[in-house]
Image (cartoon, coloured by chain):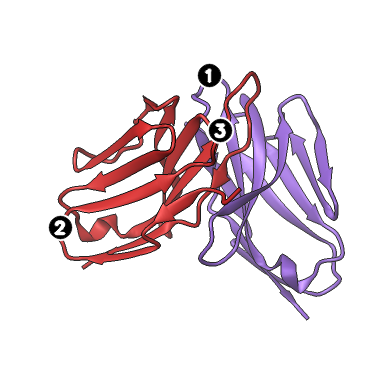
Chain colours: A purple, B red
Amino acid sequence: KQEVTQIPAALSVPEGENLVLNCSFTDSAIYNLQWFRQDPGKGLTSLLLIQSSQREQTSGRLNASLDKSSGRSTLYIAASQPGDSATYLCAVMNYGGSQGNLIFGKGTKLSVKP
Amino acid sequence: DAGVIQSPRHEVTEMGQEVTLRCKPISGHNSLFWYRQTMMRGLELLIYFNNNVPIDDSGMPEDRFSAKMPNASFSTLKIQPSEPRDSAVYFCASSFSGLAVDTQYFGPGTRLTVL
């Protein structure tokens, strides 16, 4: 059974720092991996989607990497800003699963202090 | 586009009452998902529809939970009777499922409290 783990559960950094959020998964037979952002009282917003054949994806100050063989993904945020404060979740979709079967980690709550 | 619309945003009810949550997906999307989020278990898929047909309901916790999608623009998740352990945030999401797997767009959620 696929399990997704995100460590740490919470992270606090000063504004301007570069930071890395970690995600690990137990079954490497994944179709894709996604990173989402969740603001308090809001739904999830998709940030980056990495197909299993890809190694990384970039969007602005965000860069996500995928190492299937080791079951790991990282989300790199450059020059962090207070507006980046949110909970970040990663989710994997297994091969052979239905399209809806995203398996989520519990998230890392990021706080960027001015 | 208004995005995925959910109602109500907050619901407080007493144990044993029937609860109905509603979702309007993004126009043109053909897949709809219901999720539940709790502190203990995180975000879990309850049921997934494609072209209004339930495809995977393995996440529905028990018979007290039921979901319908009578047309492409509306879905409901019903809990009858409700119990305190059903307290959670329920999210609806939609996507377009074509040849490639597309990202899911989430609604703002319904925060359910069962007393």
The quadrant in which the C terminus of chain B is found is bottom left
Q: Determine if marks 3 and 1 fall on one subunit.
A: no
Say few, some or many: other residues with alpha carbon within 10 Å of mark 2 (under 14 / 14 to 19 / 20 or more).
Answer: few
Residue at mark 3 to residue at mark 2: CA–CA distance: 34 Å
Q: What residue appears at the point 75 percent right and 34 percent down from the top-left corner? A: A67
Amino acid type shown at disc 1: Gly
Left-right relation of A97 to B11: right
- Which element is circle 3 on? loop
Of residues B64 and B75, which is closer to you in this image?
B75
Amino acid type shown at disc 2: Gln
Residue B37 in view: no
Residue at mark 1 to residue at mark 2: CA–CA distance: 38 Å
Disc 2: host chain = B
Please give the residue where the numbered disc 3 appears in the rendered image.
B28
Rendering quarter of residue A64: top right
Q: Are marks 3 and 1 in contact (CB under 8 Å)?
A: no
Q: Nearer the viewer, mark 3 or mark 2?
A: 3
Seen in the picture, residue B114 relative to B46 is either above or below; the reply is below
Please give the residue where the numbered disc 1 appears in the rendered image.
A96
Mark found first going from the N terminus, 3 or 2 = 2
Question: Whole-percent x and y of residue A101?
Answer: 49, 32
